[in-house]
Amino acid sequence: MTIAFPDVPLAGHTVTRVLWAVALAAVVILVLAQPRPRRIRTAVGTVAVSAALTATGLAVFLWGFHVPASQISPSVVVAAFLTLVGVLLGGAAVLSGWRRAWALVPMCVSLVTALLLVNQAFVFYPDTESLDPATTYTEVAAGDLPPAGRTVPVADWHPRRGLPRYGTVTTLDPANTASGFQARPASVYLPPAWYSDPRPQLPVLVLMPGIPGSPDQWFSQGAATQAADAWQLSHHGLAPVIITVDGSGGEWTDPLCTDSPRAKVRTYLTRDVPGWLVDRFGVTPDRSRWTIGGLSYGGTCSLQTILNAPDAYGSFLDFSGERTPNNGVDHESTVRDFFDGSEDAFRRQNPEDLLRSRPERFRSVAGRFVAGADDHDAVNDLRLLDGLAVGAGMDVSYTEVPGGHDFETWRTAVAQSLPFVAQRGGIG
């Protein structure tokens, strides 16, 4: 797909103001499109029904899916309300007679503006160019990858001619032999140097999405490939192998990133995925060169994983994570459902408690905490965790970047963190 105007912004304060103006104008036009005798009655009834449906949907997210209220943008709620108003008013106008079929135009406008307003909350697409995934990375079928070959330490590898200019992305299913965890497919970025013979034993960056979210979002919306390619272009094709894995088991599933009767997520992340990567892609077996990271739930999970298994990874990236693992309901049910009702078992795995009680275990661990400046919960939580990590003797830093709990923050975070990941991986 070719985008005719690739540089048109789809997010930002000016875009948001324009979209709200267009959305409200579309609703006003749809009200005026109603037959005059029942215009007011139709408008009031539509608003009431739309408000009830919006409130019901909000309740489902809050108490059905246990989404924290702080992660539900008010603009998304209002956009959903305006969408319902637009659809119901447009439908009522058209059903009142074919002469009002023109009402379909403002109805469609209200739908499009609502989608763009949702984009303002999460910044999935910063501009029109980002609507075309082909402009961000090249996909290669798993069956078209070259077979396993010779590998050498990075220090013994020399650049080769004829390598691809950019890295590629492929989709596969990591082994789950030890955990039995039913994960969604993973996406793997392979830098140009991986295609050489012999291959360098590259470091690894394991990234996880949030909830809701899918692993491929790190490439489709998170711009992880652009960050890696920017690095490898100035380093002879060398960059970390990046794998975006499923740390939850579903779009809305929250297994709390631990081994529990519900799922063995930690075993999957610390045994299955690393062993499979070494066997399948010939990456470095030195786990101190590996980094685990993620956004939101994925950020919480990355810190939780490395503190509970510091030999599995050498570094972490916690983007917009939470202070403590929780199921989104309350602490009591979290402990009951995931830690056999034992507060001691929870504390033995809780990052905050681990940093306070066993700091000597983590002095070789390094990491980066990043929060969006407008994401007040993440700012408070990560500042606290950063202070505890510093007190434990870890090599960490805390950074605030423009944005909220959204991909504006996470794109910036991964781009700024890639040099740290590469240097920790021995290719800096």
Image: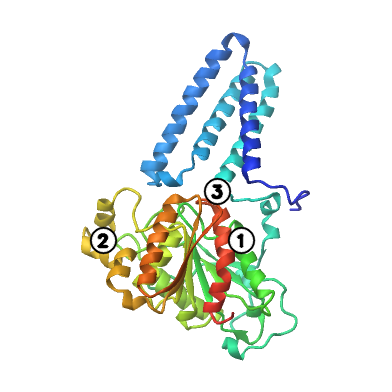
Is 121 located above or below residue 322 in the figure?
above
- Residue 266 visible, this orientation: no
Under mark 1, the amino acid is Ala
For marks 1 and 2 on the same chain, the one whose residue lies earlier in the sequence:
1
**Helix, strand or loop for disc 2:** loop
Along the viewing direction, whichever of 375 and 121 lies nearer the viewer: 375
The circle drawn on residue 339 is: 2
Residue 319: x percent and y percent?
48, 60
For marks 3 and 1 on the same chain, the one whose residue lies earlier in the sequence:
3
Q: Is residue 212 left or right of residue 304?
A: right
Residue at 49% in and 42% down: 73
* Quadrant of the rendered image containing residue 241: bottom right
- Residue 377 visible, this orientation: yes
Query: Which residue, given by chain and number where applicable, does mark 1 sit on?
Result: 223
Cβ–Cβ under 8 Å for marks 1 and 2: no
**Helix, strand or loop for disc 1:** loop
Residue at 56% in and 54% down: 402
* Quadrant of the rendered image containing residue 87: top right
Query: Which residue, given by chain and number where applicable, does mark 3 sit on?
Result: 122
Residue at 69% in and 71% down: 166
Return the residue found at the far right.
4
Task: Count all numbered tags in the image, as a single digit.
Answer: 3
Q: Distance between the residues labelled 1 and 2?
A: 36 Å
Residue at 67% in and 53% down: 130
Is 174 located above or below residue 46 in the figure?
below
Under mark 3, the amino acid is Phe
Residue 151: x percent and y percent?
58, 87
Return the residue found at the far bottom.
156
Mark 1 neighbour density, 10 Å: few (under 14) some (14–19) many (20 or more): many
Q: How far apart are marks 3 and 2 (CA)?
A: 32 Å
Q: Of circles 1 and 2, which is in front?
A: 1
